[in-house]
Image (tube, coloured by chain):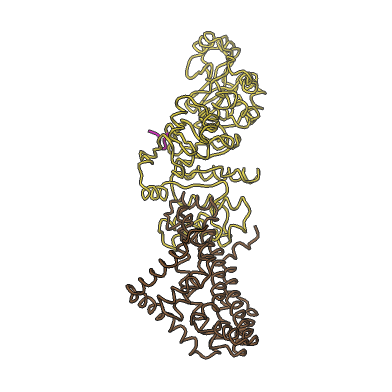
Amino acid sequence: MAFIEAAHLTKIFGPHPKQALARLRAGATKEELLASGGDIVGLYDVSISVERGETFVVMGLSGSGKSTLIRHLNRLVDPTDGTVTIDGVDLMSLSIRELEHYRRERLAMVFQRFGLLPHRTVAENVAYPLEIRGTKRNERRTRALEWIETVGLAGYEDRYPAELSGGMQQRVGLARALCADAEILLMDEAFSALDPLIRSQMQDLLMELQARLHKTIVFITHDLDEALRLGDRIAILRDGALVQLGTPAEILLNPADSYVRAFVKDVNRARVLTVETVMKPPPLRLTDETLEEALAAMQREGARIGYVVGAGGYRGVVTRDALDAAIAGPHGSDIGDIVMDAPSIDAGASLAEALPATLASAYPVAVIDEAGGLAGVLSTERVGEIFTLPMENEEKPGVPAPVPGANAAGK
Amino acid sequence: MFPDIGQPIADAVNAGVRWLVVNYGGAFESFANALLSILVPIEQALRAAPPWLVLLAVGAIAFAASRKIVLAVVLMVLMWLIGGLGLWEQAMQTVAIVLVSVALAILLGIPTGILTARSDIARAILNPLLDLMQTIPSFVYLIPAAMLFGLGKVPAILATIVYATPPLIRLTDLGIREVGKSVMEASRAFGATYRQMLTGVQIPLALPSIMQGINQTIIMALSMVVIASMIGARGIGETVLIGLQRNDAGTGLLGGLAIVILAIVFDRISQSFGQRLQSYRAARG
């Protein structure tokens, strides 16, 4: 079972949620419910699961139910139907006391409108979660100051929130959430109210901190670029229903429907996708074969080129011509003697970074993983495919599936 | 053409009050005595203290509340003028009644305001009652109050509380309800209990509004002193009443001036205290 499991969540706002739920199940539309009883469907049958240490992004436009969804995870909103389980604990089974305890110890939240206490200084705001927990004043202050420094606000600890800019206020909000020392971070459109430049700085800060802290983050946004940048996985909501759930690459390359397609249409794929999400397996991998074996393999595969991998990792390429020449020549040479240095690219690089080397090469460029081994190859044709994905007609065959096990893009 | 419902009501009320006096007279009297045991020492202390000490205390409190030396001096001069009007003793009696009334009004009003802010039902029930308390002429409840508690200070205090508490309840309620939803949600999300939200978020953020309520209560309590003097409470109100009874406009005016001065002093002190409480709002945003 995943760390955070929300199963079949339905939330109906209005005077008679239970009847509305029954009618919804019987096939009534949301418009009918609203017209007849004034009930508004916030979420309908949404299930998500978030793994420990993952950054899970919920994306949708306003009214899509994303803020309602995240508020189920700390029961600021109670579901009309469905369950929320965190680390094996069913949140609906908790009493008010237990729920308060749970929120204090396990969850921290960052808000779109910051939610700072205006009558308290920055340090007192950051220390607020500790204060609620009953931590001693001195320790509170010490720990708050550490986090204030971490988010880059040292020197502002005794200012009031109204004295700070929006970006600085949200740094306080982030420091407060981190000061709670909870393993789950809920971020409700945390950066949406900020200017683009500040937003991107805050995203950098969050990614930097996450690389160090390994929190489980549920991040709400209406901005696809932000979702692709931060998310290990992304859930896309529309009108209270889950439209697609997948890695950024899956969503970019295989949009589930026209709604998601419209979203991803304008994304700069070269910047968002990494090489490893689009590379192909190497056509011919050569290790310690003899020249004749290598030639035979090449003929069998119909390849013009082989990628040589030695004990120390990727070494270079051999061409068919070089093989022919070596076999015709004096005996005693092996593959190592005829391997050619060839350009290679890192698996984690973005397509934009890999583009020059790929286009300059006459054959598919080797992709090198972190250990220095051969992970795959990237050809000019493949790059061409990615940039000209048939976006308007989803049934068109040939939409490439992402490489299985490929990691998230944009990290 | 009209059915006579007035007489039965009046009779029933009279019978009820008489029944209370006969059966529970002792209880009302001990309640009155308890109240007096708070009021009398305060009044005696104020009257026994040398006027310069009281003047200094006013100045010190004004300075502590406002951090403005000019205001403190002006308020001291105003208080000194009361002495000049020959009404120092009476003013001290009035101050004692106002202080006790306001203290009791705060003890009753703030918790009630918190209650009505939390519960819409409580608010729906209390709202008409508060309207009634503010509009019904004081004499209507002064008559039974005087019968139950005897003439003098106690019914005066009770009448003052009835009249002066409603604005405090309303402004406490308003202040708490106006605390931003986002702040409350943040507090809840971090696991604050109801009590922690109340003491750490709602009351501090509602304080400017609550202080406004206390200010209103003080001013309304001062405006009750003349009426209170009609049921035998001593003080400046009595001076005004004497002026009225003797057709002596001058004496009446002196009493009126002294009441206005007291009102200004109380108002400035409580206002500037309230303003300092929300100094964080003045910060540029």
Q: Is residue B250 above or below residue B13?
A: below
Q: Is residue A92 left or right of residue B85?
A: left
Q: Position of residue B276 (x, y in %)?
A: 58, 69
Q: Position of residue A320 (x, y in %)?
A: 58, 12
Whether residue A372 is visible to the viewer of this picture, yes or no, is no
Report the front residue among B249 and B180.
B249
Chain with yellow colouring: A
Q: Residue B65 sits in which quadrant?
A: bottom right
Q: Which residues are magenta?
A: A1-6
**Labels in figure, total:** 0
Chain with brown colouring: B
Q: Position of residue B29 (x, y in %)?
A: 36, 78
Report the front residue among B72 and A292.
B72
Q: Residue A302 sits in which quadrant?
A: top right
Report the front residue among A348 and A177.
A177
Q: Is residue B14 left or right of residue A270?
A: left
Q: Residue visible at 47% across and 76% down?
A: B157
Image quarter where the C terminus of chain B lies is bottom right
Q: Is residue B74 left or right of residue A207?
A: right
Report the front residue among A3 and A37.
A37
Hey, which residue is sitting farthest front in the picture?
B1
Q: Is residue A305 above or below residue B247?
A: above
Q: Position of residue A80 (x, y in %)?
A: 43, 36
Q: Residue visible at 65% across and 87% down?
A: B250
Whether residue A406 is visible to the viewer of this picture, yes or no, is yes
Residue B228 in the magenta stretch? The answer is: no
